[in-house]
Amino acid sequence: MNSERNKRPRIAVFKFASCDGCQLSLLDAEDELLAVAGAVEIAYFPEASRAMAKGPYDIALVEGSITTHHDAERIQLVRRQARTLVTIGACATAGGIQALRNWEDVGEFIRVVYASPQFVSTLKLSTPIAEHVPVDFELRGCPINKLQLLELIAATLAGRKPNIPAYSVCLECKRKGNVCIAVARGTPCLGPVTQAGCGAICPAFDRGCYGCYGPMESPNTAALINQFRILGQADPAISRAFRGFNAWAWQFRKASEECNRG
Amino acid sequence: MNSKTIKVETLARVEGEAALTIRIQGDKVTEVKFRIYEPPRFFEALLKGRHYSEAADITARICGICPVAYQMSAVHAIERALGIHIDPAVRMLRRLFYCGEWIESHALHVYMLHAPDFLGYEDAIRMASDHRALVEQGLRLKKLGNQIVTLLGGREIHPVSAAVGGFYKVPAKRTVRELEPELEWALEASLATVKFVAGFEFPDFERDYEFVALAHPEEYPLCEGRLVSSSGLNIDAAEYEDRFVEQHVKYSNALHSVVRGRGSYFVGPLARVNLNFDKLPAPAREAARAAGFQPPVRNPFRSIVARALELVFACAEALRVIREYQPPDLPRVEAASCGGVGQAITEAPRGILYHRYALDASGLILAARIVPPTSQNQRVIEDDLREFAAQVAAWPLEEATWKCEQAIRNYDPCISCATHFLRLEVERD
């Protein structure tokens, strides 16, 4: 890339509606940060630098979901400046926790938080980036795994496919040697339908997976809903379990609606 | 008359999206706007109808830099609503957990976000080309903070172990003790940090602030204590909403929290150190004296020294906890689920963080209220800028702009936190 002059590839980081945690993952790569900063040009990363270089960029890392008219326009500008656009985290790939508004009257939401609702304008839905522009790769997680981020940057720069599996948390959990908390203790766990990448940390902490990496590539949510019912979970609680940080990912959305009828 | 406008369209080295406009006519500042354009995410609204056990994980997502603070305010408020009393060993572990976040957040701010202003670099990466060892020291401190959070919570951002009544799982004594050598290094590195930042050049700028922080009779405050101020406030968390009020100011799109009947107030490391200096560990107090830091310090640019002193505290406190740690009998106390209302204030890295929850008899959240530290500091940030911009009005525009940005970064503002609280400009379809 940019072979005409032996330039370092240029990376930019953009934020939409989010908590900043996914872009912080880059700064949290304490052992690798200075090496990464030597290998690439961090051209635009306002959280870290007041030097903000104009595009085009080789890689745009996009955090956050689209929730305002202004942001719906801004993402188009980002896409035009980016050779490769990668979304990082559950907000950018699935709409984030703020997508819970998508089932509600957003006007009511505004009234709950703001005393003068007439001053707030927002879109009805919180939507993922891919509903607005073509996305080259989606990195999952709430938050993303910083090692997956480094792998993704390295793979993109090398022009290869990143080694980021789409199988379920269960595989990671087994490999880790965890005892299955769903089987052994009857704890409701979203691990069977959730994509790996976190390191199966919730089961390792004696609690069920809450699905923060979103649906795995072919989740059998119907079977899991049945299993939750067998474990004694009421349908409203099952629906809430799917309506977490990836609520608007279509597989979880559908599952949550199936147990939220009537 | 000579007029100029200081304009920063995207404020850098803060968490979240904000812009700054200052208009100056001659040597008079005519307008200051610290404008936040980050979109709202409606956390209080989306918490309605969720189970209380979900509040810690949901509110953590308000901020990727201080998720532990949100988890701690959430669980303490809910424990108060449910009448739960936590195990003393859990209480100690929560202090360790919080110290981890303070170390991570303060090291990030001191080294990566604020020091470059004092040394004249655009960012820490450029600073590293001349001060590599220094930046590496900052990164190593930050990494240790993250390691503590990860040990107790599984990962550094949005950890998974915090639960109402305690933790989902607590660590073994041996694994906690493994932190000791690195913490011993970190304590020394923090003392060196105090010395280093105290040697910076600080603008001659002081104002008469009302400092607000928790205060506890025996310890430097994290999760418990009464809310006190330098103007004599002394209240319980349950009285918070009676004494603090949000005002809508015409020139700003943001709501400003003020002390009822008084005005702006100052939260965060400088407020905590000024109000709790005698509770800092001895090495921190000595380092402060050696650095000429005599509370009350009223120069906001010296907040970076207060933040470094808190790094010393957090390392010393973490060492104390890991040396005394005995795992609790049970990781958490179960609640007999029932309704109630509970409030809590804890000290996030950037200042006090207030949560209130009302729960119904099945444990579902009826109403939630969250007031993050940056919302509380916004008024004082603008007040500072109004006075400070006059001081730098005659400077070349680029230098004046940078200095005003630095004045905002004194508060380590976290815009992502503040946003759910802000009014945005009207956008019409």
Image (cartoon, rainbow, N blue to C red):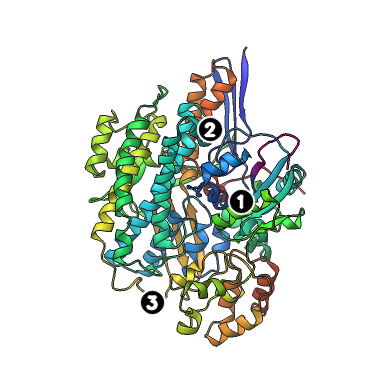
Determine the residue positioned at 58% across, 57% down.
A148
* Label 2: element kind: helix
Image: magenta residue range: A1-12
Q: CA distance from mark 2 to mark 3?
A: 55 Å
Horizontal arrangement in the rendering, residue B240 relative to residue A247 (left or right): left
Q: Are marks 1 and 3 on the same chain?
A: yes
Q: Position of residue B187 (x, y in %)?
A: 30, 44
Q: Is residue B262 left or right of residue A20?
A: left
Quarter of the rendering containing residue B154 = bottom left
Disc 1 element: loop
Quadrant of the rendered image containing residue B250: top right
Say left or right for B283 vs B345.
left
Give whichever of A135, B222 is nearer the camera.
A135
Where does the image place residue B196, in percent across and percent down from the top left? 36, 31
Asked if badges 2 and 3 are on one and the same chain, I answer: yes
Viewer-proximal residue, B418 or A250? A250
Is disc 2 in contact with disc 3, using a CB cutoff of under 8 Å? no
Question: What's the distance in space between the residues labelled 1 and 2, CA to CA?
Answer: 33 Å
In the image, residue A106 sits, relative to residue A221, either above or below, namely above
Label 1, on which residue? B40
Q: Secondary structure at mark 3?
A: loop
Q: Are marks 1 and 3 in contact (CB under 8 Å)?
A: no
Disc 1 sits on a residue from what chain?
Answer: B
Kindly identify the residue that appears in the image at 56 percent across and 49 percent down.
A20
Q: Is residue B402 above or below residue A42?
A: above
* Residue that numbered label 3 is attached to: B336
| Quadrant the N terminus of chain B occupies | top right
- By secondary structure, the bulk of the magenta-drawn segment is best described as loop
- Residue B27 marker: none
User: Which residue has dot 2 on it?
Assistant: B126
Reply above or below: B407 against B423: above
* Image position, residue B262 (x, y; %): 41, 37
